Amino acid sequence: METNAVTQYRSDRRTLVDNILEVKNFTRDITILVNEYEDSWVEDAKELADALSPLTRTKLDSEYLSQLSLLNLSGKDLTMSAIPAGMSLLKGLRVLRLESNMLESLPDEFGELRLRTLDLSENKFTRLPASVTKMSSLKGLYVERNELKALPNEISKLINLEVLKMRMNKVKALPEGITSLASLRVLDLSDNKISNVPKSIRKLKDHLEVLHLQNNCIKRLPKGFASLVNLRRLVIDGDLHAHAEVVALRKLRTFVTSIY
């Protein structure tokens, strides 16, 4: 019995040491990344200086990392290899800004983050990373000015998403999954190569208030488009202004405030 107890103790101790080292290594890496650029900033972290100075501490208290709620690493020409392992340790992170970098993908562990806002604009993405579709708590997703050619149907898993902005990409078609985003209020699809709007877009009628469709290849709007009774702002190409579905919307003046 004593031998088993000693063995278990040693095993638990090794696990504890490994966990401490993991936190220390991540904190060291994120410290280097943040401090390398003077204009990088973080907010809402209790005694952040202590959390980002593990080499001066004999014991690292990971609660500091868990309290970090916003991290801005935009405009640093980052690639995925520059992102430190251990981002999933940031349990309290709610806003992550990675716009204006050189990212083509994201680590799988990003899917463990409980983000509410993620900005991936102005990067090199040709597809939406699988880890993003696992962020069920996400409310705002910004992927503007990338090289996206399609959206995965798994985007339907973002059940809390309220804002999706993906203008200036190369998307040709929309997956049915996008019309399952029942909480969506703002949808910006402008400056893509979309030729058809799915009929199922009417499923968004309960919450959709803003819809941008201009500068695409859309020749007609689907039947049932006028079901979007809560639409307050619609931006479309000029040759669609006289479309029957738009005319029907314009009669709902309480809901439609401007059409360009």
Image: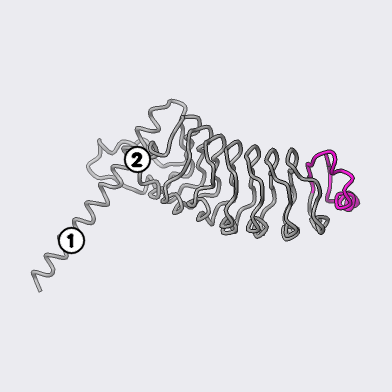
Which SS class for mark 1?
Answer: helix
- For the C terminus, give its image quadrant: top right
Q: Position of residue 153 (x, y in %)?
A: 59, 57
Q: Nearer the viewer, residue 235 or 57?
A: 235
What amino acid is labelled 1 in the image? Ser
Q: Which mark is residue 255?
A: none
Looking at this view, name the residue that lies furthest to the top.
38
Q: Is 242 positioned to the left or the right of 128 in the image?
A: right
Per the image, the residue denoted by label 2 is 51
Residue drawn at point x = 82 percent, y = 58 percent: 223
Marks 2/1: CA distance? Answer: 27 Å
Mark 2 or mark 1, earlier in chain:
1
Q: Coloured how?
A: one colour
Residue drawn at point x = 85 percent, y = 40 percent: 239
Q: Which mark is residue 11?
A: 1
Residue drawn at point x = 28 percent, y = 39 percent: 54
Magenta stretch in the rendered image: 232-260
Q: Is 71 positioned to the left or the right of 119 in the image?
A: left
Q: Position of residue 6 (x, y in %)?
A: 11, 65
Q: Position of residue 202 (x, y in %)?
A: 76, 59
**Labels 2, 1: front one:** 1
Residue drawn at point x = 47 percent, y = 43 percent: 105
Which SS class for mark 2?
Answer: helix
Q: Nearer the viewer, residue 13 or 63?
A: 13
What amino acid is labelled 2 in the image? Ala
